[in-house]
Amino acid sequence: MRIAIVSDVHGNLPALEAVLADLGEVRPGLVVQGGDLALGGPHPAEVVDRVRELGWPGVLGNTDAVLADEPTSREQVRGFVAQAAARSREMLGPERVAWLTRQPLEWRGEGIALVHSVPGDCWAMVGHDAPDDVLRETYGPLGVPVAVYGHIHHAYVRRLDGLTVVNSGSLSLSLDGDVRATYVVVEDGSVEHRRVVYDVERVAADLLAMGYPNAAGYAGWLRSGSFTAPPRS
């Protein structure tokens, strides 16, 4: 089966709409979402509603989990992310947040396992340049030919003996220098990353106009495909 994996939408409705149009040409048998649907963009409720309407199965992302507003000591939820989480939680409302935070940590099908970051944890970071032995140790225990994750916003494919590790790339807030919306299609062991143009300036303008927390930082990230952390106050 041809399976498309769409991850890290981050509240970016124009990127999602552009990818949906591209999916109409690709015609996968199944689309799975890789987490981080809402936080970090101006359209979190619209994105969640659209994905639910489409009925895509998926997994829990770290910025989905943080919307539960549970106490945590993780550095990632302080400052930049915490402020965006509070605003996104307000825009989503409790019912959407409850749906988001109920997503499983893992999805499996057709010889593919999908996690947001690593098995059993949606926060850990495995870079695109991680050594082969790290990829084997991390994703080999999934016991499937193809392991896919999102989280790092950097599309890549690494073929190891008996295991292919794939990062799906991200629809929004790229970290690989390409600002197009990126997703991946897997079919019979072949892997294709699709890069789709969308109106980045519209999304940046929406963030700025609504006064989203750290809007200038998010807008710069969208426009450049790289992220510079704001100074700590």
Image (cartoon, rainbow, N blue to C red):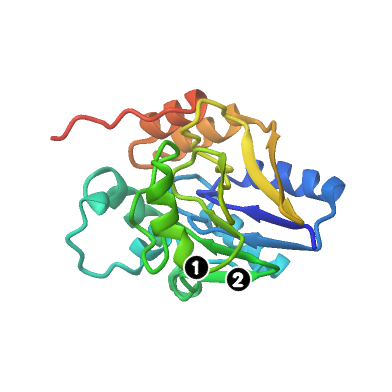
* Residue in view at x 40 percent, y 58 percent: 138
Q: What residue type is labelled 1?
A: Leu
Taking 84 as reference, is 68 above or below it?
A: below
Depth check: 61 or 147 in front? Answer: 147
Q: Position of residue 82 (x, y in %)?
A: 27, 52
**Left of 196 or right of it: where is 26?**
right
Which structural element holds mark 2?
strand
Q: Residues within 10 Å of mark 2 (few under 14, many from 20)?
A: some
Q: Which amino acid does label 2 sit on?
A: Arg
Tell me which label, 1 or 2, sits earlier in the chain: 2
Q: In which quarter of the image is the C terminus?
A: top left
Question: In which quadrant of the rendered view does residue 144 lie?
Answer: bottom right
Mark closer to the observer (1, 2): 1
| Residue with the mark numbered 1 | 142
**Left of 146 or right of it: where is 38?**
left
| Residue with the mark numbered 2 | 108
Taking 179 as reference, is 211 above or below it?
A: below
**Left of 186 or right of it: where is 225?**
left
* Residue in view at x 48 percent, y 45 percent: 41
